Amino acid sequence: MAEQIYDEVSDPRPDEEGYARGLGSRQIQMIAIGGAIGTGLFLGAGTAISKAGPSLILSYAVAGVVIFVIMRALGELLTYRPVSGSFAEYAREFLGPFAGYVTGWTYWLFWVVTGMAETTAAAVYVRFWEPGIPQWCSALFFLLLLYAANLISVKLFGEIEFWFSMVKVTAIIGMILIGIGVLTLGFSDAGDTASITNLWQDGGFFPKGIGATVMTLQIVMFAYLGVELVGVTAGESEDPQKTLPRAINTLPWRIGLFYIGALTVILCVVPWTEFQPGVSPFVAAFGKIGIPAAAGIINFVVLTAALSSCNSGMYSTGRMLRDLALRGQAPRRMGALNSRRTPAAAITASTLLMGLGVVLNYQVPAKAFEYITSVATVCGLWTWAMILICQIRYRAAWQKRHLPEPGFKAPTGVWSSWAALAFLILVVVLIAFDEDSRISLYVFPAWAAFLVIGYQVLKRRRPEAVHGVPHDHLHAGGGR
């Protein structure tokens, strides 16, 4: 039978989710690495440097600690019950059906709007080399290419993501090695001015004050969005009990190398005063060193980062939408798997909406499009908060011996999760004070109201879809 559709009423969580466990350790590791490296680093860091100077390094370090706490909390939940709809499943179990409904749809929306933005961005990057190619042609080509890859198999998705991540990792490591060479050997055009003293000689380490550094925290946190994607792969990992903890435990050195290490080297090679908002710090550094075609190299890297994000978006939206369908909280057809055991219908529906973003970019003013994509930022914060709250609730249930002990414990228990939640609240407050980011706080309430209305309609039309599932039934497919 080419397609398998589960009955969301009689069996909202079947014994087996039906997915092929085609993601090996190598691919999981690179998905985890790629999720932590995006255009926020390659492009957005230039704006942040101009606002905070060298102290931006401290912002990335503090935010990195919080991200690690979130991921260790997620790791605890994943080893307890590795399922593809992880965020929504945990919210549903520990906070109730409404929380699972909101989390599932919110994370789905997060990647749909991210896919809209990244597809359009990829088309813009292509025009760097071929300005004559219509933007919609490039966007459509990339969308169809990644759509086909996601339909074929999860293994192909993982392989594409592996090589996309390799490009980003190679670019960063290359920048670090070249920068160290400039600092130690003094070669290149930047050799005379490159020095570690650039970290404090132009106004000190906090040239614009500690307040300016704190304000960059919300920019920095957005750069980490997507790091939690490894949690969605749990249902398709070959050995989730081993590969997922390993991927999460490597997060500190990944943040230390790819973010803190790269920014430290760049700010030593190029004084922070020379960076401009909207200009990639990598382009500025490569240009200062005198590397030919620096802008072209970084354009290729950010193109790869955009395609990587879009590829991840198709993958995660398909799994999350299917999970909602199995619960009766999305159209039944979205629960289908094709003969290759990929959620073809859910991927198709999500991809069509991502394609709508290309159309919207031409039909509505730029500000209107920004309003749509701005909701992604708060969607990410919501997902992280749900992970932390669910881990706190899970710990309480485990300590009362209502649930089994986790195989991968967060080292600091729940106190660090409470601290991370407080930090996320601080980030929301900072967004409210930032004129450029504040719009996301206006858009999200509208989305929340839409979800509440949808839930009330669902309660009337499909009451069985919003009722809690007995604990034993809920765990039928877990713990494999």
Image (cartoon, helix red, strand yellow):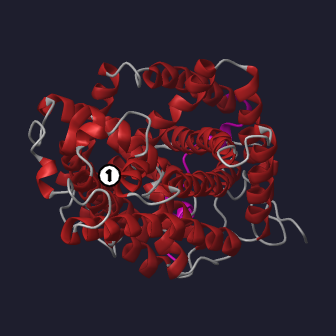
Total marks in image: 1
Secondary structure found at label 1: helix
> Is residue 472 on the magenta stretch?
yes
Q: In the rendering, at what x and y percent does residue 183 appear?
A: 21, 65
Q: Can I make out residue 156 in this image?
A: yes
Q: Can I make out residue 19 in this image?
A: no
In this view, 85 is above or below 127: below
* Nearer the observer, 245 or 111: 111
**Which residue position is annotated with label 1?**
393
Q: In the rendering, at what x and y percent does residue 4 appear?
A: 83, 65
Occupied quadrant, residue 336: bottom right
* Nearer the observer, 254 or 285: 285
User: Residue lying farthest right?
Assistant: 1
> Is residue 128 on the magenta stretch?
no
The answer to whether 190 appears left or right of 29 in the picture is left
* Nearer the observer, 377 or 48: 48
Q: Give the residue at x 42% y 58%.
A: 36
| Stretch of the chain drawn in magenta | 460-480
The answer to whether 52 appears left or right of 340 in the picture is left
Q: In the rendering, at what x and y percent does residue 425 appear?
A: 28, 33
Characterize the local packing of mark 1: few (<14), some (14-19) or many (20 or more) Cα atoms within 10 angstroms: some
**Residue kind at label 1, given as amino acid type:** Arg
In this view, 195 is above or below 241: above
